[in-house]
Amino acid sequence: MQPDPRLHLAKKTSAGGSGRAISAGRAAQLNARYAHAGAAEVLDAAFREVPDIALVSSFGADSVVLLQLAAKVKPDVPVLFVDTEMLFDETLEHQKRVAELLGLTNLHVIRAEDSKILDPNGTLHKSDTNACCTLRKTAPLQKALAQYGGWITGRKRHQSGTRQRLHMFEVETGTNRLKVNPLALWSAQDTIRYMKATQLPRHPLVAKGYPSIGCAPCTTPVAEGEDPRAGRWRETEKEECGIHFVDGKMVRTPAVDNVPHSGDIQ
């Protein structure tokens, strides 16, 4: 089956449900004001700045930290979970366990509406990982986010080279939605210490050598001494699924740099 070129195209969205655009200047002000603030303070500021903000979570290796912090500040925060229908069974089980543990009452499970048509055999990832990510993750998330004025992610600077300049407050190109990264400055050790102190459950695959967890076909265990994200799309130049952007540019492999796209999405 040849990849459908439509899978590379992202529909342009407007600002979310509030219709409130955030300027780069305002994001800079927030970054300066909360430069030394804790994650809970950053979350509180985000909820006040954009009342209709959503939290996007993969329920991955240490996602429970951000979910717990957000639930403490705003128990009914909308949580968007993209089920690509290619996730590990352990991820789906972990998602249910964490949602129940934290009392997440506003959880939305997002799935692609046309995966059975555009990828009926579930083999698109073998020929074009970028198209598969767009179909199963990027496009459905972008559609879901269209009703919100901003979104919160669990990205951290230490996770990869593409995230080293990550700010706590960003503005998406094209949508002008506020994008908030409350844990941007956290180290891996900070996360582990917090999880131990609060007795939060970690994803069961972490103990099996998966420090970064995506879809089952495109994630492998990581050997001791390897970069934590080395198991994601191994033996390719791909570092991100395409829902995150750096300096206004979508993080993709060079092979798709010329593919049309619009603005940034998680």
Image (cartoon, rainbow, N blue to C red):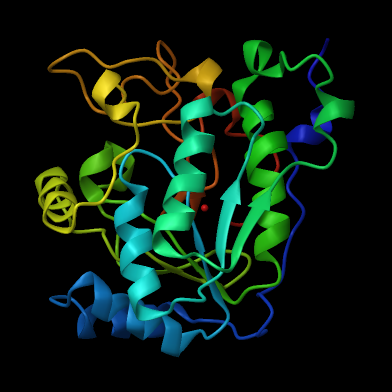
Residue 141 image point, x, y percent? 65, 52
User: Could you say which is closer to the camera, residue 13 or residue 39?
Assistant: 39
Drawn side of residue 176 relative to residue 191, left or right: right
User: Could you say which is closer to the camera, residue 42 or residue 255?
Assistant: 42
Q: Residue at x 57, y 33 (%)?
A: 257
Drawn side of residue 110 relative to residue 234, left or right: right
Drawn side of residue 153 relative to residue 253, left or right: left
Residue 246 image point, x, y percent? 41, 50
Quarter of the image that includes the N terminus: top right
Does residue 99 lie above or below 242 as drawn?
Answer: below
Q: Residue at x 85, y 27 (%)?
A: 116
Drawn side of residue 62 relative to residue 239, left or right: left
Residue 200 image point, x, y percent? 25, 51
Q: Is residue 262 in view from this perspective?
A: no
Does residue 43 lie above or below 220 as drawn?
Answer: below
Residue 124 image point, x, y percent? 71, 17
Q: Is residue 230 in view from this perspective?
A: yes
Does residue 202 lie above or below 231 as drawn?
Answer: below
Label tally? 0
Q: Where, by quadrant of the figure, is residue 75 drawn?
A: bottom left
Q: Where, by quadrant of the figure, is residue 101 drawn?
A: bottom left
Does residue 150 lie above or below 12 as drawn?
Answer: below
Q: Residue furthest bottom?
A: 48
